[in-house]
């Protein structure tokens, strides 16, 4: 039996999206929807209800947002500071914008030699390689030259000639025992489709270690939720269509969500819309209008799979999703009905 199900009547609405958090087409209400506490929990929370704490700072070219419930204001402030410091340190590892970041230094290393890297960089690249293999190359972190050329084209609002060289994820050889990476040819590694997800996971780990049970971490389009807010059924997430109209809302807990699309990152030339998403098979940017929203147990997986599924043709992406147990997905084309995998939660119209 197919895991997909067409939702013919679930079309976009022009109703405005108003919420506590809005960023890159996804809205988060940091208070849940319906009360569902146990009697003992309700009594304890009535006597000493936890307070909602919200913190945000600009990092990674977007807004890093953290919300959680705690009765310790001083601890909450310290946790937020720890999280933002963690973001800065991880950015020094993963950013391809920084010439002195660890990944930038790796990209400049001599080819055909094994280079030692940090545990975290090795882990993220290893995860990326697994998803590249599973998606038959639709996800590829060696597209750095192509993504850099797209950025230059976006600034000038016109397509610029691409470089002749075109690397592949297969040009990275990893050795798990020594934590080394060998480059078979010159490459520029771009972790933009996976690093934010990993960083989101790491911030939630900071909160978990402090015994925070109810939390949400949002970095751009990467979101991770633990238990629902006090007295609620879940965190409410608003989903946009490519037209920026409202599709509906989800109630989520203990899951990660990511959306990949061209709603905000694109430029137009000769009436063609060129998104920031590069198809590794052609080296060209995607020109069709489609949002793909994924759910997974980690933000890293949701992030990378959203990119992979968005790059693939829709029929191939849906077939691949049906075979991949670790993800659920929604495919939301421009001005057409959305399609969902069978395990995707119900989208409620507003």
Image (cartoon, helix red, strand yellow):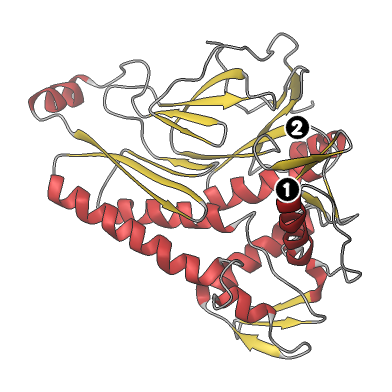
Secondary structure under tag 1 reads: loop
Q: Quadrant of the N terminus?
A: top right
Labels 2, 1: front one = 1
Horizontal side of residue 209 vs 8, given as left or right:
left
Could you tell me if residue 175 is visible in this image?
Answer: no
- Number of residues whose C-alpha sits closer than 10 Å to that of mark 2, classed few (under 14), some (14–19) or many (20 or more): many
In front: 269, or 109? 269
Q: Residue at x 69, y 38 (%)?
A: 261
- Number of residues whose C-alpha sits closer than 10 Å to that of mark 1, classed few (under 14), some (14–19) or many (20 or more): many
Q: Which residue is mark 1?
A: 276
Q: Which residue is mark 2?
A: 290
Residue 116: which quarter of the image? bottom right
Q: Residue at x 81, y 74 (%)?
A: 171
- Number of marks in picture: 2
Secondary structure under tag 2 reads: strand
In front: 162, or 110? 162
Horizontal and vertical percent position of residue 282: 91, 54
Above or below, 165 against 182 in this view is above
Horizontal and vertical percent position of residue 42: 18, 22
Q: Residue at x 87, y 33 (%)?
A: 271
Could you tell me if residue 57 is visible in this image?
Answer: yes
Horizontal side of residue 119 vs 7, given as left or right:
left
Q: For residue 63, which numbered disc appears in the image?
A: none
Residue furthest to the front in view is 156
Above or below, 120 against 346 in this view is below
Horizontal side of residue 212 vs 22, given as left or right:
left
Above or below, 230 against 195 in this view is above
Residue 152: which quarter of the image? bottom right
Given contact means CB atoms under 8 Å apart, are the residues at marks 2 and 1 in contact? no
In front: 194, or 123? 194
Horizontal side of residue 146 vs 102, given as left or right:
right
Horizontal and vertical percent position of residue 31: 33, 25
């Amino acid at each position: 039996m197919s895991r997909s199900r067409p939702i013919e009547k679930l079309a976009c609405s022009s109703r405005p999206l108003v919420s506590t958090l809005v960023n890159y087409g996804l809205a988060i209400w940091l208070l849940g929807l319906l009360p569902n506490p146990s009697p003992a929990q309700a009594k304890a929370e009535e006597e000493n209800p936890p307070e909602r704490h919200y913190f945000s700072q600009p990092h990674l070219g977007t807004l890093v947002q953290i919300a959680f419930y705690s009765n310790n204001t001083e601890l909450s402030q310290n946790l937020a500071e720890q999280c933002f410091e963690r973001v800065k340190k991880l950015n020094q590892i993963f950013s391809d914008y920084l010439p002195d970041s660890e990944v930038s230094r790796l990209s400049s290393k001599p080819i055909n030699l094994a280079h030692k890297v940090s545990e975290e960089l090795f882990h993220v690249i290893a995860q990326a390689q697994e998803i590249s293999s599973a998606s038959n190359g639709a996800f590829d972190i060696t597209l750095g030259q192509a993504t850099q050329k797209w950025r230059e084209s976006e600034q000038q609002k016109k397509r610029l000639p691409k470089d002749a060289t075109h690397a592949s994820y297969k040009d990275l050889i990893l050795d798990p025992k020594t934590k080394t990476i060998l480059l078979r040819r010159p490459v520029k590694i771009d972790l933009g489709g996976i690093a934010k997800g990993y960083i989101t996971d790491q911030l939630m780990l900071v909160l978990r270690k402090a015994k925070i049970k109810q939390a949400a971490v949002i970095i751009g389009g990467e979101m991770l939720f633990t238990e629902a807010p006090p007295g609620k059924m879940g965190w409410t997430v608003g989903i946009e269509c490519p037209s920026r109209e409202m599709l509906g809302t989800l109630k989520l807990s203990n899951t990660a969500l990511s959306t990949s699309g061209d709603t905000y990152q694109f430029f137009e030339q000769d009436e063609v819309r060129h998104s920031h998403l590069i198809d590794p098979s052609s080296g060209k940017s995607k020109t069709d209008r489609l949002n793909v929203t994924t759910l997974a147990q980690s933000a890293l997986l949701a992030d990378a799979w959203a990119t992979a599924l968005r790059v693939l043709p829709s029929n191939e992406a849906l077939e691949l999703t049906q075979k991949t147990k670790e993800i659920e997905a929604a495919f939301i084309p421009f001005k057409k009905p959305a399609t969902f995998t069978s395990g995707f939660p119900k989208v409620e119209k507003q």
